[in-house]
Amino acid sequence: MQFGIFTVSDVTQDPTTGRTPTEGERIKAVQAIALKAEEVGLDVFALGEHHNPPFFSSSPTTTLGWIAAKTSTIQLSTSTTLITTNDPVKIAEDYAMLQHLADGRVDLMMGRGNTGPVYPWFGQDIRNGIELAVENYALLRRLWREDVVDWEGKHRTPLQGFTSTPRPLDGVPPFVWHGSIRSPQIAEQAAYYGDGFFSNHIFWPPEHTQRMVEFYRRRFEHYGHGAADQAIVGLGGQVFMRKNSQDAVNEFRPYFDVAPVYGHGPSLEEFSSQTPLTVGSPQQVIEATLGFRDYVGDYQRQLFLIDHAGLPLKTVLEQLDLLGEEVVPVLRREFAALKPAHVPEAPTHASLVAAAGGTKDATVYAPADDVTGQSREEVEAR
């Protein structure tokens, strides 16, 4: 099972000091957080995508490319790649390039995001959100799997004889998770392709997450990808820890009370009792996380949100130390002991290459340059 963290890249005022970091400070903080995640032994670092304040991450591949150059083991992912408003051609190119730069340590999570105005900013209509998610992803899969693509759809200009470059590393595209909070259509899409389904798992009660995951598992089996309990499931979640549980509650409360995503509503105690939010000791986080299995079954990836709502970098790094030293080692051991042998691990580049029969050079060696119309030898001879 994979354990990691994800960030939504918010730039939020620290309510205890009244200071709001600059975008530059938050970018540097996220870089430090990613490096720390590998240092403490986590498996995954995931970064969101937004195109509006108060978020900075408009180009996840740029940030993840920097992190790839500074790390060697951690899997790099997105906590949202906007499949609805990004051009599938650009997604195919950007993430194949990142896959090469990271030596395969890349997957991504497709989503529609939570900012309605992003649709007109990129020339789309929010009323077509589900249609865009379905059509764009179908094209993306073809771009990664076919050397030359002829395509025509409803929401994008046609393609004739198009080759996306670079081709996926070793001829194997990055693994894709489909992230959703409330849309069964997205769970259906994940099941249809045999991809992973990632439930955000932060704002809703366990019963809601259980229904979404069960639906995905049934449809995964329906489409012939394996038994329902072999479907690839990921969960989000948020934690805040201190050695003493009451210290954790006291320290986190001011951040919770004004957090953009859930402040000014139910109390911290009410929210913690009704959702997977866990604020307390490392042992309480262990017990709560192990409890997720009771209603979603065996799953493959657990990501924690630990850096939003204005929490200072020092505090976030302390949270990572607690995750790496006290929480994740226990969770690894306990989940491994419970998982049946027939339930797969989360896919990695190595496992996908093995399933495809080994590596291959996927480069498309074109006979002539599309710009000059001449072969390389002809150009060099001039």
Image (cartoon, helix red, strand yellow):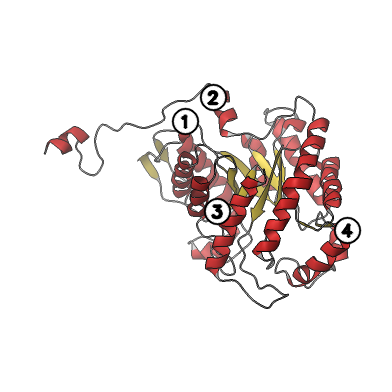
**What's under tag 3, amino acid-wise?**
Thr
Q: Nearer the viewer, residue 51 or 182?
A: 51
Q: Residue furthest bottom?
A: 18
Nearest to the eye among marks 3 and 2: give it: 2
Q: Residues within 10 Å of mark 3 (few under 14, many from 20)?
A: many
- Mark 1 → mark 2, Cα distance in angstroms: 9 Å
Residue 329 sits in quarter: top right
Give whichever of discs 1 and 2 has the lower sequence position. Answer: 1
Q: Is residue 63 left or right of residue 268?
A: left
- Mark 3 → mark 2, Cα distance in angstroms: 29 Å
- Relative vertical location of residue 331 with respect to residue 120 in this rendering, above or below: above
- Mark 4 → mark 1, Cα distance in angstroms: 46 Å
Tag on residue 84?
3
Residue underneath mark 1 = 171
Q: Nearer the viewer, residue 10 or 43?
A: 43
Residue underneath mark 2 = 356
Asked if labels 2 and 1 touch by Cβ distance under 8 angstroms, the answer is yes
Q: Residues within 10 Å of mark 4 (few under 14, many from 20)?
A: few
Residue underneath mark 4 = 273
**What's under tag 2, amino acid-wise?**
Ala
Q: Residues within 10 Å of mark 2 (few under 14, many from 20)?
A: few
